[in-house]
Amino acid sequence: MKNIYVKDIINLCHGQMLIGNELEKCNDFSKDTRTIKEGEVYVGIKGENFDGNKFYKEALAKGAKVCILEECDLTEEEKLLYHDKTIVIVNDSIETLKTLASYKRSMYDIPVIAVTGSVGKTSTKDIIANVLSQKYNVLKTEKNLNNHIGLPLTILKLKDQDCLVVEMGMNHFKEISKLTAIARPTIAVITNIGTAHIGNLGSRENILKAKLEILEGLSPDGKLIINNDNDLLNEYYDRSKIKDRIITVGINNESRYQAINIEESELDSNFDIGSTHIEVPVPGEVFIYNSLVAYATAKELDLTDEQIKEGIKTFTLSANRMSRSINKRGVTIIDDSYNASYDSVKSSIDLLAKSHNTRKIIVLGDMLELGQYSEEIHYRTGKLITSDKIDILITLGTLSKDIDKGALSNNFPQDNIHHFNNSQELLTFLDNELVKDDIILLKGSHAMGLTAIADNLKKLQ
């Protein structure tokens, strides 16, 4: 295991040791006093609504051995009390995290796979990690900790692993640029280019530019894996100057790794790549694409087809992403409440349409960060709702009223559309409405709180 020491924080990050030992090892980092463990390094981060620097005493009481803080005043009595602890003061704790993560990354000559894209980043990351774990000891981004804090914290967890899979998210230009400079991937993945964050970036073309920043940190002989069926990625490939380093996957367009003989059900899917038969344990075309990416990644890292097949077959979804359950009332609940975009809603509708349940109900919340495109994209989303696929449309929030308008323009029955402005009204309606053999799918931006509604539905009797 490669170690970071307190002296490295002092030297690399221009830190000042208030008390402690320069030779103390720093191998486990945390920014949350609620979950910090004995022996970890606590990093005090100042946010918009909180200041983590104020909680260092709680961190020390719970067993933190080192604190990295932006400010701290210790009395002589406190210095004696914390005589076996180390406190280092830095100018910027977030920049310190980035610097230490970059330093940690430089210690490891291992495959690093970085995943970005408008939708499907987390599930793609999870499938890749599960496949690669058939051969490697893999460290991956937990949940979707994919930003300027989550990515460094992931890299700082490196110990004896021989492969790293990280997710990279962004809202604006130059954010992926900073993440890829830290991670320095050997394989980069772009799942697709959709409309998520278009309100910040102005166009899908600009979203592509922002995602392509991932190439800035890619190793000179590194490979880029793209979804060749995505229109903008397909166009990028056609004009790219690094075609020899791009690996394409797809279903419709000719690609290096192309899915054929596809069979889908409401529970799973399977397909062939050449003579290799792949079984995907979750439904939906999006997971066929994700599996293709995992296959391509694994082939670059010399896994056998049998290892790849097993890794895809045993993959499990993260929480609130297409998780399926049946409550005591006999209602099937598909909880896809973590986030939403036009593209992911389209996939959800296609999945719901394959169900054999008596009534198909979809709950859609506002989609955020769409800016001036919000009305148009919500309206277009509504036009996806057709009576041959969905029986009841339920919307939540202010922006989602445009989903209703789009559905109505597509001749969806007005009596089958129900709009709510708050979660409690929606939950009360569902409690009275849902009956045995219904299937309901919930999807919306995370801030809409549909996860809590899904959890309540699972408890209905």
Image (cartoon, helix red, strand yellow):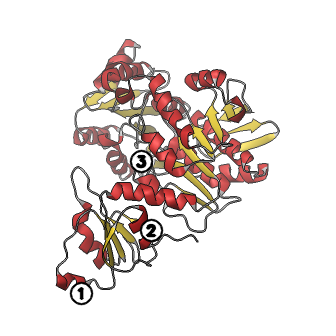
Which marked residue is nearer to the observer: mark 1 or mark 3? 1
Residue identified by numbered label 1: 80
In the image, 369 versus 313, the foreground residue is 369
At mark 1, the secondary structure is: helix
Q: Position of residue 415 (x, y in %)?
A: 32, 21
- Residue 88's label in the rendered image is none
Residue identified by numbered label 3: 147
In the image, 417 versus 213, the foreground residue is 213
Kindly indicate the quadrant of the structure image that contains residue 8.
bottom left
Kindly indicate the quadrant of the structure image that contains residue 7.
bottom left
Question: Image check: 78 left or right of 140?
Answer: left
Residue 98 is at least partly visible in this image: yes
Calculate the distance from the C-alpha at mark 3 to the C-alpha at mark 2. 24 Å
Question: Image check: 54 left or right of 193?
Answer: left
Question: Which label's residue is closer to the chain start, 1 or 3?
Answer: 1
Q: Residue furthest right?
A: 275
Calculate the distance from the C-alpha at mark 1 to the C-alpha at mark 3. 38 Å
Q: Residue at x 56, y 68 (%)?
A: 159
At mark 2, the secondary structure is: helix
Residue identified by numbered label 2: 8
Amino acid bearing label 1: Leu
In the image, 233 versus 23, the foreground residue is 23
Q: Residue at x 22, y 69 (%)?
A: 72
Amino acid bearing label 3: Asn
Q: Is residue 270 above or below residue 75?
A: above
Amino acid bearing label 2: Asp
Question: Image check: 306 left or right of 263?
Answer: right
Question: Which label's residue is closer to the chain start, 2 or 1?
Answer: 2
Q: Position of residue 4 (x, y in %)?
A: 48, 69
Q: Is disc 3 surrounded by few (<14), some (14 to 19) or many (20+) residues within 10 Å? A: some
